[in-house]
């Protein structure tokens, strides 16, 4: 009992089991330590069987309706989930060439079960014209017909001279017919190609765009790869990803340079996520260790004592890992954070015990000091362990499996941390009595005049925060966790921005074709839906009208790829850069004049190998253009039976048909996503898929967290009441925790840092540490005339600071989820400490002025 | 508009009873070349004969359907009637403008090759001061009859070109504008 304590220890504490256990550990230190060592060895063995599942979709109960629907979709169409997507972005010709080379390299390569790239698939090459809308088809065919002789001439003489002569001929004809503007796209593309060469760069002539009159519009070409998964590896798609990376790296630089190539898809995103979590982890770990060492040394006074506390922490973590392996077997992205939880709580018990021991050791020999500490602090430690474990168990009963696992592990871990603290520290102190005494410093305090208004300010802050906290939300989108600068995340963004490749879609299953069409029509009537697709809708519409147009232009197409060029204008000498420049006129406005000037500049370079290089740049994509046009000569009426098998497999599995619903807006935005899911669910409640899972998860998790938080607080209150029988003490413990929770939630709103699967663990941690701190400070306040002159607030402060020091450095992570966890931990623990310091003593004192209940 | 198009398509698709054979196609082209050459090289240009040759050789239903397509609905029944009346003269004028000027000899039929269900009959039209101009007559069988459904020079389809031109005029000037244009360019 210190001279600062005015009240008696908790009743019967001399016979409290904790006090007796501490005395026992101190009496048989070697046996106790040997027992701890044995448990450690067993835990290490058990920990080897612990697995990690990073799939956020499995963090919720599979019995939830949206999970069941997603599961049904995944079972029927497993190929839609694990695909690797290589996205090639750039000018159409360059992208198609790169896709073609990549598909050649990937087809049949190790780890690749199937490759599908619509842009080079024979079916789409042959019938692609039928997928254009009628107006676009007509426009393209007209341009093609007009260009047929030009293409025949270029095909007959694919040289610089041939290009200049063909362009000159086209110019003469265009001038004769008064349609010079029709050649502007060709001129503009030639300016780009020649201009690049003059500047020492290279730009391959983009024939498709120039002939279609759409030069410069970049395209996105996806290659979908079904990985041959190896489930014996940590990353089952690892071989696939290696093969893809190798194929991209092996591309001729002349082919890869004009395009952007990225890889994404579920396996890639997950692998890169793990990498981004690991990135900077060394720096983070180094900083954490340094900070923890510094904080422990400051808290406990000597390096040896800091080492003992650290050892208690490490033993707690190892034993908890073993317990996790035996109880849950596989961790997920939330429950893996038990390390954070147990660091905060593991060190909490050790610091409180050692700080109090330091206090008692100043007036008693070490062994007696241990006994005194056990009697004084034991009941508080037992109550904190029981109430925190109960609070965590409240989380174990929710549909949020991730948090349920963490709740169970946390409850076990708290009891382990408590056991380790009351076992290891007495045993070690018995063997090395010098460990009992530290520096004995107290915390610098605010002057009393200022401290008087602190509870009021804290309460007001908490109440304002409680209002703001209503805006807190849970972001269940796994993309929200990932590093936005990670390549796979950026490439995912490319797909998301393209209506043709948007990966976030809903789906409905049916075994009836008529119903599929009816559903598609009803869904397409919604403003939130861009299109609803099922198997029949993959067959081009209005084929008769389109084939008629194709038929009309077919001889032109045939002429372009097979015919001999015809001299349509008066015979002229073969064009040269200078002659064509003179004919176009350097003063002519627009692309024609620009080409004249570019040709004049180019003419000055002709002494070198410029002709050869320009020729190569002009004709790099020309053979592919002719190949594509040749394939189109065979266009014919198509049915479902003609569709490529990989495409059919995405929409039909046995008798089941999948109706895919594509959003009209970018549903990366939570509001748009919620509106899309709600609109579709209003028409087809059984629609499922990732957006529905994200929305369902957000609601489920938010509900689970609120329910679990309230249950946890209620359990803590009940335990505190049963143990203390004082309403004031219960309020002094729980009110600061509740207000700290409000401040944390308000911070998520103000900082636009919503709760996610990574940072949501701050809530149970806040309850755990908050309740612990509240119990210690409340009980000490009741006994001490000036609680801030005792070791307890010091222990509370250093315990929180140790956790902040250990994990705030995670804010440096590139992984958004991890970084937000670091930031939120710092905010939540700071709020917990400030609220406890400001309110707990005041509430205890308020209670003592009134009659006991 | 859509039912009209579908009706046109139906008529068009239903009309050819069999695949076009090369010889009848060649014969059609030869008759056309013979008659038009005679008309164009007569001491006094014989526009009536030229127009008659065109009327005999061309499948105007097809030309009308392709030249107007869905846009036929933009014309009133009376305008459509007028369009049909003007079409032979318009095509005859087009023929005369394209092939009559600088004509330096009798066009020579060279070869016949398949083009889907049609035949392309290649002719070389001698020109003054230039190489002979290769022209393809696209001929389709309609029962026993074989008719020209398109004329192509250097892979460029007259039908496609004129379809685009008519669409632009219709959009700019409406049905009356189109008919006025045809009247101004008609034999």
Image (cartoon, grey):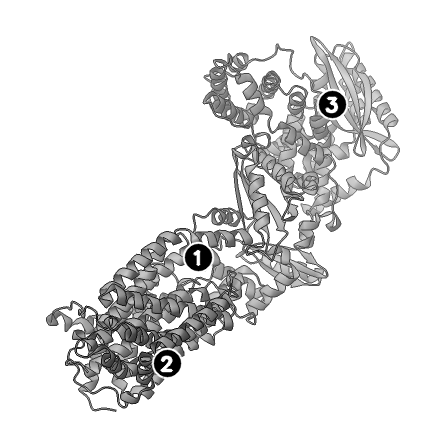
Q: Which quarter of the rendered picture does the N terminus of chain B lie within?
A: top right
Residue, disc 1: A481
Which of the chains bears the disc numbered 2?
A: A
Labels 2, 1: one chain? yes
Q: In the rendered image, is residue A133 in sight?
A: no
Residue A197: horizontal and vertical position, in percent? Answer: 49, 22
Residue closer to the observer: A642 or B180: A642
- The dot on residue A453 is none
> Mark 2 or mark 3: which is in front?
2
> Mark 2 or mark 1: which is in front?
2
Q: Which quarter of the rendered picture does the C terminus of chain B lie within?
A: top right
- Whether A222 is drawn above or below A475: the answer is above
Residue, disc 3: B92
Which of the chains bears the disc numbered 1?
A: A
- Whether A799 is drawn above or below A223: the answer is below
Residue, disc 2: A386
Q: CA distance from mark 2 to mark 3?
A: 102 Å
């Amino acid at each position: 009992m210190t001279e600062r304590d005015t009240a008696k220890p908790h009743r019967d504490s001399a016979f409290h089991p904790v006090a007796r256990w501490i005395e026992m550990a101190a009496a048989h230190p070697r046996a106790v330590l040997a027992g701890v060592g044995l448990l450690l060895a067993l835990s290490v063995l058990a920990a080897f069987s612990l697995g990690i599942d990073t799939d956020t979709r499995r963090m919720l109960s599979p019995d939830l309706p949206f999970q069941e629907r997603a599961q049904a979709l995944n079972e029927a169409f497993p190929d839609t989930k694990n695909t690797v997507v290589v996205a090639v972005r750039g000018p159409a010709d360059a992208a198609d060439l790169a896709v073609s080379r990549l598909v050649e390299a990937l087809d049949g390569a190790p780890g690749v079960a199937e490759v599908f790239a619509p842009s080079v698939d024979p079916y789409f090459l042959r019938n692609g014209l039928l997928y254009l809308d009628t107006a676009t088809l007509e426009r393209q065919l007209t341009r093609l017909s007009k260009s047929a002789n030009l293409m025949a001439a270029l095909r007959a003489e694919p040289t610089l001279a041939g290009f200049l002569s063909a362009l000159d001929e086209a110019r003469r004809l265009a001038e004769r017919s008064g349609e010079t503007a029709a050649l502007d796209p060709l001129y503009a593309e030639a300016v780009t190609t020649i201009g690049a060469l003059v500047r020492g760069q290279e730009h391959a002539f983009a024939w498709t765009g120039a002939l279609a009159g759409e030069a410069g519009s970049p395209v996105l070409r996806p290659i979908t790869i079904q990985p041959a998964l190896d489930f014996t590896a940590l990353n089952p798609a690892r071989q696939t990803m290696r093969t893809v990376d190798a194929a991209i790296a092996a591309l001729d630089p002349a082919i890869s340079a004009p395009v952007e190539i990225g890889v994404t898809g579920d396996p890639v995103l997950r692998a890169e996520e793990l990498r981004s979590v690991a990135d900077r982890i060394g720096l983070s770990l180094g900083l954490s260790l340094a900070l923890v060492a510094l904080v422990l040394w400051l808290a406990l006074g000597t390096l040896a004592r800091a080492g003992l506390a650290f050892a208690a922490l490490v033993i707690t973590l190892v034993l908890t890992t073993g317990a996790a392996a035996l109880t849950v077997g596989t961790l997920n992205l939330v429950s893996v954070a038990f390390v954070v939880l147990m660091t905060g709580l593991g060190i909490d018990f050790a610091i409180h015990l050692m700080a109090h021991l330091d206090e008692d050791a100043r007036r008693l020999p070490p062994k007696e000091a241990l006994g005194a500490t056990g009697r004084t602090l034991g009941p508080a430690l037992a109550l904190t362990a029981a109430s925190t474990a109960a609070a965590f168990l409240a989380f174990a009963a929710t549909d949020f499996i991730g948090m349920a696992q963490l709740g169970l592990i946390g409850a076990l871990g708290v009891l382990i941390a408590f056991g380790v603290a009351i076992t290891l520290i007495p045993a070690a102190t018995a063997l090395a009595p010098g460990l009992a005494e530290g520096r004995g410093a107290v915390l610098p305090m605010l002057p009393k005049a200022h401290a008087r208004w602190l509870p009021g300010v804290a309460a007001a802050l908490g109440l304002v925060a409680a209002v703001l906290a209503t805006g807190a939300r849970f972001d269940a989108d796994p993309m929200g966790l990932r590093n936005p600068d990670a390549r796979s995340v950026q490439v995912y963004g490319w797909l998301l921005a393209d209506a043709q490749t948007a990966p976030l879609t809903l789906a409905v299953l049916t075994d009836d074709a008529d119903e599929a069409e009816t559903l598609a029509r009803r869904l397409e009537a919604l403003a939130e839906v861009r299109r609803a697709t099922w198997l029949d809708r993959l067959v081009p519409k209005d084929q008769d009208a389109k084939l008629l147009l194709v038929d009309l232009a077919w001889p032109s197409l045939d002429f372009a790829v097979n015919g001999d060029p015809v001299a349509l204008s008066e015979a002229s000498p073969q064009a040269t850069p200078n002659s064509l420049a003179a004919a176009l006129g350097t003063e002519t406005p627009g692309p024609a004049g620009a080409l004249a000037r570019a040709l004049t500049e180019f003419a000055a370079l002709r002494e070198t190998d410029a002709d050869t290089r320009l020729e190569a740049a002009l004709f790099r994509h020309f053979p592919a253009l002719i190949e594509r046009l040749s394939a189109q000569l065979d266009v014919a009426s198509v049915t479902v039976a003609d569709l490529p098998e990989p495409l059919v497999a995405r929409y039909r599995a046995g008798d089941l048909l999948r109706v895919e619903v594509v959003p009209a807006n970018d549903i990366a935005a939570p509001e748009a996503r919620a509106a899309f899911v709600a609109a579709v669910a209003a028409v087809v409640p059984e629609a499922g898929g990732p957006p529905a899972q994200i929305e369902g998860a957000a609601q489920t998790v938010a509900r689970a967290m609120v329910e679990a938080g309230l249950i946890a607080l209620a359990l803590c209150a009940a335990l505190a009441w049963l143990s203390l029988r004082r309403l004031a003490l219960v309020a002094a413990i729980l009110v600061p925790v509740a207000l700290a929770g409000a401040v944390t939630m308000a911070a998520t709103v103000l900082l636009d840092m919503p709760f996610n699967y990574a940072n949501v663990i701050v809530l149970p941690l806040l309850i755990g540490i908050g309740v612990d701190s509240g119990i210690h400070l409340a009980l000490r306040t009741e006994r001490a005339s000036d609680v801030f002159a005792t070791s307890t607030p010091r222990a509370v402060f250093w315990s929180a600071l140790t956790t902040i020091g250990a994990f705030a450095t995670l804010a440096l992570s590139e992984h958004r989820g991890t970084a937000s966890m670091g930031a939120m931990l710092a905010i939540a623990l700071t709020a917990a400490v400030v609220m406890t310091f400001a309110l707990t003593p005041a509430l205890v004192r308020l209670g003592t002025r009134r009659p006991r209940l | 508009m859509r039912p009209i198009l579908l009706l046109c398509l139906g008529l068009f698709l239903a009309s050819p009873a069999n695949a076009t054979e090369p010889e009848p196609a060649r014969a059609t082209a030869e008759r056309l070349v013979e008659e038009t050459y005679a008309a164009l090289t007569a001491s006094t240009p014989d526009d009536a004969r030229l127009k008659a040759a065109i009327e005999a050789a061309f499948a105007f239903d097809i030309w009308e359907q392709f030249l107007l397509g869905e846009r036929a609905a933009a014309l009133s029944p009376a305008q459509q009637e007028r369009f049909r009346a003007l079409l032979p003269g318009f095509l005859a004028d087009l023929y005369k403008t394209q092939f009559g000027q600088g004509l330096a000899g009798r066009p020579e039929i060279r070869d016949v090759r398949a083009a889907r269900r049609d035949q392309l009959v290649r002719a070389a039209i001698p020109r003054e001061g230039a190489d002979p101009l290769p022209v393809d007559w696209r001929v389709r069988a309609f029962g026993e009859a074989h008719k020209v459904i398109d004329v192509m020079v250097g892979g460029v389809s007259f039908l496609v070109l004129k379809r685009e031109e008519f669409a632009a005029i219709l959009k700019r000037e409406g049905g009356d504008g189109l008919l006025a244009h045809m009247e101004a360019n008609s034999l």
